[in-house]
Image (tube, grey):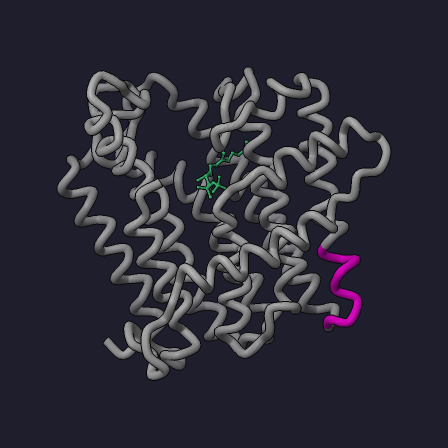
Amino acid sequence: TELECNGSGEFKLKEYMNSKRKRVNRALDEAVPLKTPKKICEAMRYSLLGGGKRIRPVLCIASCELVGGDEASAMPIACTMEIIHTCSLIIDDLPCMDNDDLRRGNLTNHKLFGEEVAILASAALFCLAFEHVVSKTKNVPPDRVVRVIMEIGSAIGTDGLVAGQFGDLECEGKEISLEELEYIHVHKTARLLEASIVCGAIMGGGNVSEVERLKKYASRIGLLFQVVDDILDVTRSTKELGKTTGKDLASDKATFPKLMGLDNARNFAQKLVDQAVEELEHFDAARAAPLYHLAHFIADRQN
Ligand code: GRG
């Protein structure tokens, strides 16, 4: 299609992502200086700067650029999204939640710093996320900043991450329907990805219909992200003979492949990519190339 080849030749997603990631990482490093209380700042920096694909920040910036904004306008919000993502991961790993020892191949925050520090570091990151938006957008029209803060808030609370996480906890060990599984993932995963894209478009000065289209794109790739994650869990554990990830077809954990079968889950993923990129057809093809390729990156990713 026109989007695949954007006129100036092949779009290089890897280079695009690497260059965005590099600047996001620099901005995140500056956002959390090592001050007092030193232990808390160390714990905040440990989880924030210890790897991660930075998919939310990249989506935020790409969306801002798509509607005509620049990277610098999106950067504060891009950082805020990653800060919130990090604070949710610290909570998710705690013994009272998923009780994980490892995250991104490293010790989880509470394993390294202790539960008390991990909880405080997560709370501090949460506050920082909002401070960061306000302090770094001094020259932005205030109505944009207010809309962005609303979007972020609603993506996290009882309409967002918290609802998804709670649904997940409540369903543990129970048989759930496809609708319930979709509810969990829409809230746990899709809402923050969606907010990243919507906020990028708001910061870039996108109009109502552009923001609406990007929101639709975002909700599709948000769900896609999780469907692919579930598919990878199955294919990975099938490949690594004898090893299971705990989420494979035989385990109790509800996943899309388990509830609808692997082939149907793959078809569902394809449908979601198609629906997502359909929304991009209303934009300039060259400008939409990053989001087009990011959708395919999420669909085709191997980790
Ligand atoms: C933040 C107030 C507040 C509450 C959080 C614990 C909780 C409530 C929500 C948990 C949400 C959660 C852990 C969702 C999973 C999201 C997800 C898909 C994580 C993996 O994302 P990637 O693949 O990870 O982008 P990397 O490591 O690349 O950053």
Across and down, in percent, residue 91 comes to 58, 28
Image point (69%, 37%), residue name? 45
Magenta stretch prevailing secondary structure: loop
Where residue 145 appears, as percent x and y from the top left, is 70, 63
Q: Position of residue 101 (x, y in %)?
A: 51, 19
109 and 88: which one is in front?
109
Q: Which residues are magenta?
A: 133-140
Q: Is residue 84 magenta?
A: no
Q: Name above or below for residue 155 compared with residue 108.
A: below
Quarter in which the N terminus is drawn: bottom left
Q: Position of residue 124 (x, y in %)?
A: 74, 36
Q: Report the residue at 48% width, 33% height from top.
A: 104
Which quarter shows the C terminus?
top left
Q: Residue at x 76, y 34 (%)?
A: 41
Q: Taking 235 as reference, is 284 above or below it? A: below
Query: Considering only vertical position in the picture, is 12 above or below 152?
Result: below
Where, by quadrant of the figure, is residue 112 drawn?
A: top right
Is residue 57 shown left or right of residue 15? right
Left or right side of 199 for 268: left
User: Is 138 a magenta residue?
Assistant: yes
Left/right placement of residue 278 relative to residue 287 reads: left
Q: Name the residue located 28 percent from the left edge and 62 percent from the top edge.
A: 275
